[in-house]
Image (cartoon, grey):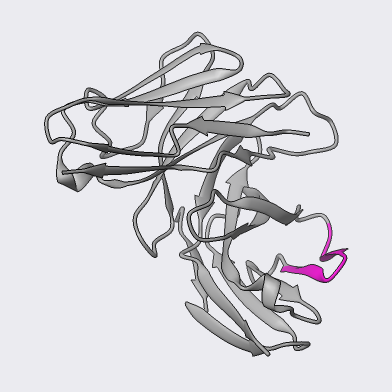
Amino acid sequence: GAVVSQHPSWVICKSGTSVKIECRSLDFQATTMFWYRQFPKQSLMLMATSNEGSKATYEQGVEKDKFLINHASLTLSTLTVTSAHPEDSSFYICSASYSARPSSYNEQFFGPGTRLTVL
Amino acid sequence: QQQVKQSPQSLIVQKGGISIINCAYENTAFDYFPWYQQFPGKGPALLIAIRPDVSEKKEGRFTISFNKSAKQFSLHIMDSQPGDSATYFCAASIGGNEKLTFGTGTRLTIIP
């Protein structure tokens, strides 16, 4: 159980265009979804936390107007990279959690990631 | 104070040996310490996790040792296998706040 999917798995776009990445929890309702960015051979850096139906909370230094996050339902969150530039090229990973599950404490389930390349 | 320091950066272990990765934290409010395994091009997967009310947790070949007074925790992989070759991340979070703070990662290579 507890599967999280991401779409697309990879995307190449031209500089200045916008790209949308979807994150879905397939077999559970996610009360919270997280978006991370990971550069090659580096750790995961949290970008933002989103709860269904409310505005996302962005980490310090993350431009909220550039990285638009929508959490429209308990199974879907989207990250839109607006006016993408080559420095936005990275591996974007989402995770989802549900705090109602009594046997797991704060457990997050991660998606497979989306490789974004901006030319 | 939110940092989690992880060492070593890379580790080479012979097949059948014990792999040990260490993490240290400063924030005493952290109360959940998971370890994640990540293969290239994939998202991280939860391996094992511990809370500070126990000093050790074992699941199969994987063991977490936790030292609350030293603010350190470590992952031990017994009988290491080539399939264990991956990058391992420790993390920590605060109860009621699910934000995970990740360590810098350890690239583990198991050689025959």
Q: Nearer the viewer, residue B49 or B38?
A: B38
Can you tell which quarter of the image residue A102 is in?
Answer: top right
Residue at 67% across / 80% down in the picture? B20
Q: Which residues are magenta?
A: B54-66
Query: Is residue B68 found left or right of B87 in the rendered image?
Result: right
For residue A99, side relative to residue A45 (left or right):
right
In magenta stretch: residue B107:
no
How many marks the image carries: the answer is 0
Q: Nearer the viewer, residue A107 or A83?
A: A83
Residue A96 on image: x %, y %: 60, 31
Inspect this view and state whether residue B33 appears.
Answer: no
Quadrant where the N terminus of chain B sits is bottom left
Dominant SS of magenta comes to strand
| Quarter of the image where one finds residue B80 | bottom right
Residue B98 in picture, x, y percent from top left: 59, 36
The image quadrant that residue A66 belongs to is: top left
Image quarter of the C terminus of chain B: bottom right
Residue B48 located left or right of residue A25: right
Check the image and report above or below for B1 versus A72: below
User: Does B47 sit above or below residue A28?
Assistant: below
Q: Is residue B72 above or below residue B103?
A: below
In percent of the image, x 74 and y 39: which residue is there? A105
Residue A4 visible, this orientation: yes
Q: Could you say where residue A36 lies in the image, as x and y percent from the top left? A: 43, 41
Of residue B32 and residue B109, the one placed in the foreground of this image is B109
Name the residue at 23% across, 31% down. A63
Q: Position of residue A103 (x, y in %)?
A: 85, 36
Question: Is B82 rendered above or below residue A96?
Answer: below
Q: Residue furthest left?
A: A16
